[in-house]
Image (cartoon, helix red, strand yellow):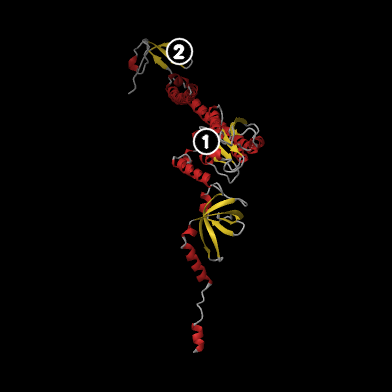
Amino acid sequence: MEQMNLFLNEPMVSSVSEVTAHIRNLMEGDPVLQDVWVKGEVSNLSIPKSGHMYFTIKDEGAALKCIMWRNAVMRSIYQPQNGDMIEVHGSVNVYEAGGQYQLYADKVRPAGEGILFQQFLQLKEKLENEGLFDEDRKQSIPQVPKKIGIVTSPTGAALQDMRDTIQRRYPIMEVVLAPSSVQGDAAPDEIVAALQRLNKFKGIDVILLARGGGSIEDLWAFNSEDVVRAIAKSEIPVICGVGHETDYTLSDFAADLRAPTPTAAAELATPDMIDVIYSLNIMRDALAQFIEEKIQGNRHQLQSLSSALEYLSPQNKIYQDLQTLDEIENRLNRRILHKVELSSARLMGLEKQLTALDPYAVLKRGYAVVTNQSGNVVKSVDDVSIDERINIRIKDGDFDAVVKNGEKDE
């Protein structure tokens, strides 16, 4: 019984999960922790394949683990680097599986630049609502431009980097420089003027707007509303390569194509000569094959037309008529020959009949033909009279005689 009382008097024991859930509820119920800006130095930054960003911010006395989900990372125009002083917005909560609290970030900005950053966001929203950043208004970049215009400082390293890249990749490219300052109060007006000059210059195929990296103040000229509108108004495609890979300006959003660096802008604007030669060789072979096939096709068509023309030509008609005439002549000759043969056979038959009836043939057998003085053949004793002179024809001649008597057979 005492043991039971002792057991009942023991304090309640909670599980780790229960304690962690209680802490989470406390944090989620604290409005300060659910909408907080925290300033610190970035360390242990990593972005795995998932696209989420993991990092730690710290000061002299403490460190706070942070996580920024992929969607928030993609929306962010600024990505911190290790060692940067940044300001992070989000909510503090417990990661129960690890037993630690951490900041779930949704916004990141450089520390000490909050006012400029807010100006940046406000102008970005304004221009975005006007449609200046819409993808459907952006122009395509020519694959093989003949002439490139560059807007940058004539003394900056960015210009030399771009020239070296163009010379290496496509040395026959013509480059036109429109010099402009890229930092300071005068920079926006000079950039706008340089863009306008290149738009009036004949033959420019693409414009590179570029400068090297720097702080947000150094790059602020490229956030100028006038510069952004000049880029959007340009009739020539604009590639913007301002700062380093993690730097974003409003000019990047207005440009037809964003490059992470000036060197990358030059690479995006120019083809590789080796690739061009390879493509030209392929096109040459394809063109040669096409021409050969076209010639063969035309040759066959010409032969067909020639045969058709030859068949329909008057000369061919004459030849056909001559052949028909020869055939008719042959048939006529065969018919005449057949007719002659039939006539000859008939004539021979008549000749045989005539020969059989020829009185002279009878004479050869010893008979004679007697005619009176009138030349009529004497067929009966009644045809002559006594003392009438008659002619007797025999096989080898004739002679005259006188009828002395005559007696008719009974």
Question: Residue shown at 62%/40% (left/top)?
Answer: 212
* Front residue of this view, candidates 398 and 121: 121
Residue 60: which quarter of the image?
bottom right
- Are there few (<14), some (14-19), or many (20+) residues within 10 Å of tag 2? few
* Front residue of this view, candidates 228 and 326: 228
Question: Residue shown at 44%/11% (left/top)?
Answer: 399
Query: In the structure shown, which secondary structural element does the residue marked by tag 1 occupy?
Result: helix
Report x, y in % for residue 49.
58, 55
Residue position marked by numbered label 1 in the rendering: 227
Residue 293 visible in rendering: no
Residue 377 located left or right of residue 97: left
Report x, y in % for residue 243.
60, 42
Q: Is residue 68 above or below residue 126?
A: below
* Front residue of this view, candidates 37 and 337: 37
**Residue type, numbered disc 2:** Asp
Residue 391 located left or right of residue 117: left
- Closest to the camera, between mark 1 and mark 2, is 1
The quadrant of the picture occupied by the C terminus is top left
Query: In the structure shown, which secondary structural element does the residue marked by tag 2 occupy?
Result: strand
Mark 1–mark 2 Cα distance, whole angstroms, equals 152 Å
Residue 383 located left or right of residue 184: left
Furthest residue to the bottom? 1
The dot on residue 129 is none
* Front residue of this view, candidates 120 and 197: 120
Residue position marked by numbered label 2 in the rendering: 398
Residue 240 visible in rendering: yes
